[in-house]
Amino acid sequence: MTVMNNHCMNNAKPFSIDEIGAARNAFLQYEPVKQVELLSVMPTDEAVGILSHCSITHVQDLLCDLDAQGHKTLAHQYAKQLGMVYAERKPIGRSDSEQKEERDELSIWHRVKQRVGWVIPVALVGVVSGIFIY
């Protein structure tokens, strides 16, 4: 019973929803640069509480900026506690041509062109081995 009581006490949320909501509203009044600065100095549980009430894209942007400012471990820690998979990504402020190039690189046709060189030989080996087995 003591183990369960200790477990429940350790998992108790330190802040109420009203407190986190007020902190989030105050946090969002700052510019993103200041928000990143605040995330780097505030206690982890408070930061995670605030970030859990922000939009996912905003959190990803903040984590990316936090990582860019040299707080990679902290960014990964926040992402892990929020249940996110944190992957470094390029900054949002890219030009339209850069975004189009990136989309083109990820297109299906591009993937087919990358793989056709080894898919055809593997298929031929499969056909030849099928003939021998038959």
Image (cartoon, rainbow, N blue to C red):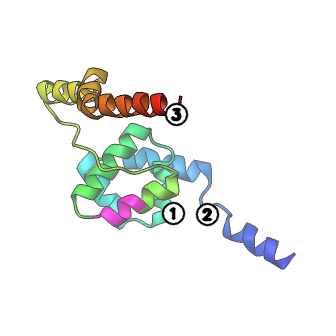
Q: Quadrant of residue 73?
A: bottom left
Q: Is residue 23 above or below residue 102?
A: below
**Is residue 46 a member of the stretch shown in magenta?**
no
- Label 3, on which residue? 133
Mark 3 vs mark 1: in front: 3
Amino acid type, mark 1: Asp
Q: Main secondary structure of the magenta part?
A: helix
Residue at the far bottom: name it.
Answer: 2
- The kind of residue tagged 3 is Ile
**How many angstroms separate mark 3 from mark 2 (CA)?**
67 Å
Instruction: Determine whether the residue tagged by mark 1 lies in a helix, strand or loop.
Output: helix
Select label 2 or label 1 by which is in front.
1
Q: Give the spatial CA distance, label 3 vs label 1.
A: 62 Å
The image shows residue 130 at horizontal and vertical percentages of: 48, 30
Residue drawn at (39%, 51%), measured in percent from left and top?
86
* Pointers 2 and 1 in contact (C-beta within 8 Å): yes
Give the residue pinned by disc 1: 45
What residue is shown with label 2? 14
Indicate left or right for 71 with 26 as reference.
left
How many neighbours does mark 2 have within 10 angstroms: few (below 14), some (14-19), or many (20 or more)? few
Front in this rendered view, residue 73 or 40 = 73
Residue toward you, 108 or 16: 108
Q: Amino acid at mark 2?
A: Pro
For marks 2 and 1, the one nearer the N-term is 2
Instruction: Give x and y (percent) for residue 72.
Output: 31, 62
Q: Tell me where the magenta segment starts and ends, as one range.
A: 71-76
In front of the other: label 3 or label 2?
A: 3
Q: Earlier in the sequence, mark 3 or mark 1?
A: 1
Residue at 27% across / 21% down in the picture?
109
